[in-house]
Amino acid sequence: MQRIGLPADERRCHPHVTLARLRRADPDRVGRVPQQNGMLVSERFQVREFHLHASIRGSDGADCSIEHSYPLTREHMAAAESGR
């Protein structure tokens, strides 16, 4: 992100993608889901932006919010590739 002019974030971070949140699920059964569904097929779609989300766990589940949005325009992509 620094290549496109965004400042470095000094906070400890564990980048990940959450596929599901399951309470009291059998870990072996959950672990088989990606293997059994690895052949996901989707129609093409255009991505115009992506979001950085924050998730704070509470007693009633997670409270999620969008921290920042990143547009994926041709201009932004060109700037990232050129190091601007």
Image (spheres, rainbow, N blue to C red):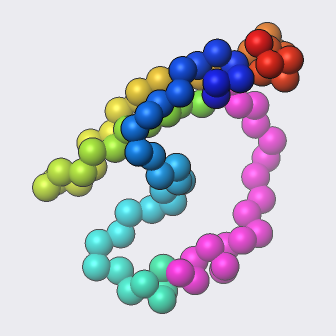
Residue 6, percent from left and from top: 58, 19
Q: Is residue 27 magenta?
A: no
Q: Where's the C terminus, which quadrant?
A: top right
Residue shown at the point (41%, 29%) measured from the top left: 66
Q: Residue 46 lies in magenta, yes or no?
A: yes
- Identify the image quadrant of the N terminus: top right
From the viewer's perspective, is 15 left or right of 81?
left
Above or below 72: residue 21 = below
What residue span does the magenta drawing correspond to? 31-48
Q: Quadrant of residue 41?
A: bottom right
Residue sitting at 84 percent across and 23 percent down?
A: 81
Q: Is residue 9 left or right of residue 58?
A: right
Is residue 48 left or right of 52 when viewed as pictured?
right
Quarter of the image holding residue 48?
A: top right
Q: Residue at x 28, y 79 (%)?
A: 24
Q: Compared to 34, does 74 lie above or below? A: above
Q: How many marks?
A: 0
Residue 8 is situated, as x and y percent measured from the top left of the image, at 53, 27
Percent position (x, y) of residue 30? 48, 79
Give the answer, above or below, for where 84 lies relative to 37.
above
Please tell me which residue lies in front, 46 or 4.
Answer: 4
- In the image shown, does 53 or 46 lie closer to the viewer? 53
Could you say which quadrant of the image residue 47 lies in? top right
Q: Position of residue 62 (x, y in %)?
A: 27, 49
24 left or right, relative to 29 = left
Kindly report the secondary structure that dominates the magenta region of the rendered protein.
loop
Can residue 72 be seen in the rendering of this structure? Answer: no
